[in-house]
């Protein structure tokens, strides 16, 4: 019943001590894994620190016992137990990696634990070793082309082992308890493993083939919903739409799926005439078998353990508490499988249930007041969706780097459709076992809600500003977590006035997030810190152009969020290397992209890039660039200098699009990965002359530029986009020496974070860096406190960056002068004749919005 009187407060559930114990156990496992990973990387924790922590733990526990705070004592012990458990678990992991590296086996007997995933390196699956000294260790098997065993298989393979590397990939392997990779050259024997997975493997394979008969994205969703099989869905446009609309969890088998399976199984067993207790046991066994059939996902195991715990408590006559049952289920899984602490599905599942348990009633009361008596039936589903969304936001924002604004609406609409698809899919599989014709008919019916779910997700994801990228995702996650804790602590009672004010504030906040900050005046060029890759943003008033999209979707979303961009008029991919277009998928749903350009010849053959570009903007808005074309961005011209003709291999560095950015007397050259062979040609033909700024090609490699070209270009500032601690050794000492000899100020993203050039109409420009790499504290202060702290932050950033200063001996290059204004900010100006005016021969793709213009045109030099 709705509560409309402020004097009637909705019941606030208490937080069971078991919840705090489970949370501290979870945190302890994280600590134990981190300590072992640091030791694996050669950075072990000093012994004196371990002794000190142990020495401090004893008096803390003694003090808590003396004061009677037993819950705090148990939590401290749970933290210590979790850290010990994590240390032991990942100690076994480290020993397994070392053992396999030392023995270097060439023959492996493994059990396949999951469905294969496809990447640039081929197909791979997570497996468990069945023989050898490291028996039980997990590895990632990279299969030969065309030979991928199904889940539950026992495989005898020939190959070679590679231990987990000391980088981000190795850290991910460590968290999954995988000791490394095995590249299988050949498979000798494939049978079903003598385990529960192997026993149900043939049934799952048959069900997967039956569901595979349903075509399109609806069939892919149906396979994911019924079997947890995401192979067909991964990397598709539907997968991107589900992520944008906050619907990723509906594919992962979790509590909602198990509820449906339990209801169907209970109904069928009831029809068979079984009693209450046998029916309950039968439902538990059926649901457990379904958990194995769906791939033993930790989220599904959590839901099954919760259901069994609640049923056991009910059978013995004990009152069940949602928080306690959740804590027991999560804690039990963490004790038996500590690696579940890092599983995204498990985290989302636990967080969603916690939101429903601790905030569901309050949100429902507020929803009742907002909807009123006439729409009271809508309050419960809306409240459940909002509570789960609020609880999972700290995780989704941190992992995906974006916040979906349409998630509540999408979950309310798609949730029932997915449940219908699950029921229909299970009935279709049962019908297929009886009759092929009956199964085919039921599959068609089951595909209807699946196809409708995909359509709804696509329409919602296509809405303007369906999701917004977050600049500091983990900071945003902490803010979401603090907001949820504050709501629970205050527990505000709803009234009609408060509900209207809250709804208005939420609406204003969503509009503000969608619109974003106002566009800066004049031209700005920002070299985004996206790691070992390129992403350079040009903005002139309301027009935006992105040159390259970085190596990953997450880094691209974070970079775009830091820049506050909501629309890109165009994206130029200089060449088809993954570190220049790998982050294109991160733009989908969070940024409206007008067109995508690539070097001439890049679209002659189908590729991952062409498919990704078509998914981002549509095939009609994907085209190519060659020398002689010019992009007009407001009052800024971006001339294409290279390639001269169609390229044979668009993935070669020499195929990179080279751009000359010009505004007034200011000139900047963006090179992509083009090196000295291309620059020497352009300089020799006078296409490039004296420039203000040079984006150094190929992340500052040894052959990025020659001394002769640098002498003629004589850039004031040299920008290098490079990842911190990259394995290529970029930028090389040789290239840095050449740039220093050319009297260029070197600014690198691995040291300075995002670097922005602000260009005035008279050709002067300033260079600023956000200092995220140089000084994280200064960057955080500036983000939190705002403009008043900027001078101090600029000073801190400048000191940490230690910018290159030209040597005192020698004469600065002719025609240049540099005026130092303040710490961290320099204004540069070059005396140059006015640029030559090109004669327009043709115009294409003209876009107008107010006074700003974006054009693509052919010019005559």
Image (tube, grey):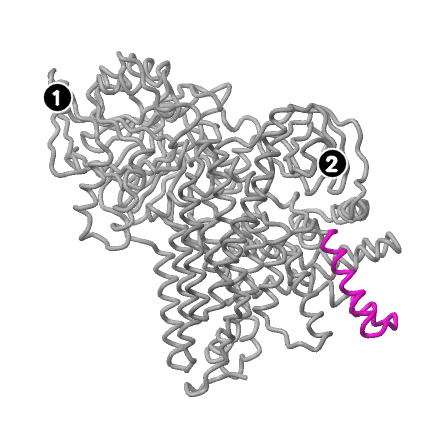
**Quadrant hosting residue 315:** bottom right
Which of the two residues, 70 or 336, is positioned nearer the viewer here?
70
**Quadrant hosting residue 92:** top right
Numbered tag placed on residue 85 in the rendering: none
| Residue 767 image position (x, y, % from top left) | 21, 36
Q: Secondary structure at mark 2?
A: loop
| Residue 193 image position (x, y, % from top left) | 79, 40
Q: Secondary structure at mark 1?
A: loop
Q: CA distance from mark 2 to mark 1?
A: 72 Å
| Residue identified by numbered label 1 | 815
Q: Is residue 283 left or right of residue 571?
A: right
Nearer mark to the viewer, of 2 and 1: 2
| Residue 171 image position (x, y, % from top left) | 51, 38
| Residue 592 image position (x, y, % from top left) | 42, 47
Provide the residue span drawn in magenta.
265-293
Which of the two residues, 233 or 150, is positioned nearer the viewer here?
150
Image vertical order of residue 719 relative to residue 12, above or below:
above
């Amino acid at each position: 019943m709705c509560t409309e009187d402020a004097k009637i407060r909705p019941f606030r559930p208490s937080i069971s001590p078991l919840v705090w114990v489970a949370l501290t156990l979870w945190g302890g496992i994280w600590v134990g894994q981190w300590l072992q990973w640091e030791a694996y990387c050669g950075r072990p924790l000093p012994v004196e620190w371990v002794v000190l922590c142990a020495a401090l733990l004893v008096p803390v526990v003694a003090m808590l016992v003396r004061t009677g705070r037993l819950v705090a004592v148990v939590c401290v012990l749970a933290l210590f137990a979790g850290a010990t458990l994590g240390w032991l678990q990942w100690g076994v992991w480290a020993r397994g990696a070392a053992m396999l590296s030392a023995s270097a086996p060439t023959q492996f007997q493994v059990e396949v634990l999951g469905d294969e995933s496809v990447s640039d390196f081929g197909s791979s699956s997570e497996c468990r070793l069945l023989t050898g000294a490291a028996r039980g260790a997990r590895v990632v098997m990279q299969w030969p082309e065309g030979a991928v065993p199904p889940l539950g298989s026992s495989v005898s393979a020939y190959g070679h082992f590679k231990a987990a590397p000391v980088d981000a990939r190795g850290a991910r392997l460590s968290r999954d308890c995988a000791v490394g990779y095995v590249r299988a050259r050949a498979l000798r024997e494939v049978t079903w493993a003598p385990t529960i997975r192997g026993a149900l493997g043939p049934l799952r394979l048959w069900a997967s083939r039956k569901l595979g008969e349903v075509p399109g994205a609806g069939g892919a969703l149906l396979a994911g919903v019924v079997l947890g099989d995401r192979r067909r869905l991964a990397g598709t446009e539907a997968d991107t739409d589900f992520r944008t609309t906050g619907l990723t969890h509906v594919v992962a088998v979790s509590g909602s799926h198990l509820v449906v399976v339990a209801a169907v199984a209970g109904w069928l067993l009831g029809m068979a005439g079984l009693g209450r207790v046998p029916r309950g046991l039968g439902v538990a066994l059926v649901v457990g078998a379904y958990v194995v059939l769906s791939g033993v996902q930790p989220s599904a195991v959590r839901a099954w353990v919760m259901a069994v715990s609640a049923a056991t408590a009910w059978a013995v006559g004990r009152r069940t508490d949602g928080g306690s049952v959740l804590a027991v289920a999560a804690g039990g899984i963490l004790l038996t499988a500590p690696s579940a602490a890092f599983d995204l599905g498990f985290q989302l599942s636990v967080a969603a249930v916690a939101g429903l348990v601790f905030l569901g009633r309050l949100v429902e009361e507020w929803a009742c007041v907002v909807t009123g008596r006439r729409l009271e039936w809508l309050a419960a589903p809306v409240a459940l969706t909002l509570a789960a969304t609020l609880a999972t936001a700290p995780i989704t924002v941190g992992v995906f780097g974006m916040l979906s604004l349409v998630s509540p609406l999408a979950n309310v609409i798609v949730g029932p459709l997915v449940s219908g698809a699950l029921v229909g899919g299970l009935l279709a599989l049962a019908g297929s076992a009886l009759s092929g014709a009956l199964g085919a008919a039921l599959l068609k019916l089951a595909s209807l809600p699946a196809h409708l779910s995909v359509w709804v997700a696509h329409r919602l994801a296509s809405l303007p500003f369906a999701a917004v990228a977050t600049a500091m995702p983990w900071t945003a996650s902490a803010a979401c977590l603090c907001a949820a804790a504050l709501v629970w602590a205050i527990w505000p009672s709803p009234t009609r006035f408060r509900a209207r004010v809250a709804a208005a504030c939420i609406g204003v906040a969503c509009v503000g997030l969608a619109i974003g900050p106002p566009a800066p005046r004049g031209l700005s060029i920002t070299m985004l810190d996206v790691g070992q890759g390129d992403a350079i943003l040009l903005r002139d008033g309301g027009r935006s152009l992105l040159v390259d999209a970085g190596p990953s979707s997450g880094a691209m979303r974070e970079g775009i969020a830091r820049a506050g961009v909501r629309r890109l008029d165009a994206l130029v991919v200089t060449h088809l290397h993954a570190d220049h277009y790998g982050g294109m998928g991160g733009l989908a749903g969070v940024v409206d992209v007008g067109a995508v350009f690539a070097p001439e010849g890049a679209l002659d053959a189908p590729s991952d890039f062409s498919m990704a570009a078509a998914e981002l903007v549509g095939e009609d808005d994907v085209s190519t660039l060659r020398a002689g074309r010019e992009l007009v961005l407001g009052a800024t011209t971006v001339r294409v200098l290279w390639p001269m003709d169609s390229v044979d291999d668009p993935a070669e560095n020499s195929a990179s699009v080279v751009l000359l950015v010009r505004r007034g007397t200011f000139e900047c050259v963006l090179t992509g990965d083009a090196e000295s062979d291309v620059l020497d040609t352009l300089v020799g033909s006078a296409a490039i002359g004296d420039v203000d700024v040079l984006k150094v090609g190929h992340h500052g490699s040894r052959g990025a530029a020659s001394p002769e070209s640098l002498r003629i270009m004589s850039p004031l500032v040299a920008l290098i986009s490079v990842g911190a601690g990259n394995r290529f050794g970029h930028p090389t000492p040789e290239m840095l020496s050449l740039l220093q000899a050319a009297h260029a100020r070197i600014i690198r993203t691995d040291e300075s974070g995002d670097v922005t050039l602000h260009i005035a109409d008279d050709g002067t420009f300033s260079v600023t860096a956000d200092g995220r790499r140089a000084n994280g504290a200064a960057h955080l202060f500036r983000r939190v406190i705002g403009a008043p702290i900027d001078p101090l932050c600029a000073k801190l950033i400048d000191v940490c960056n230690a910018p290159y200063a030209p040597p005192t001996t020698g004469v600065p290059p002719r025609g240049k002068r540099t005026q130092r204004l303040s710490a961290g900010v320099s204004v540069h100006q070059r005396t140059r004749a006015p640029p030559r005016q090109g004669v327009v021969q043709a115009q294409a793709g003209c876009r107008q919005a107010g006074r700003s213009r974006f054009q693509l045109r052919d010019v005559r030099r």
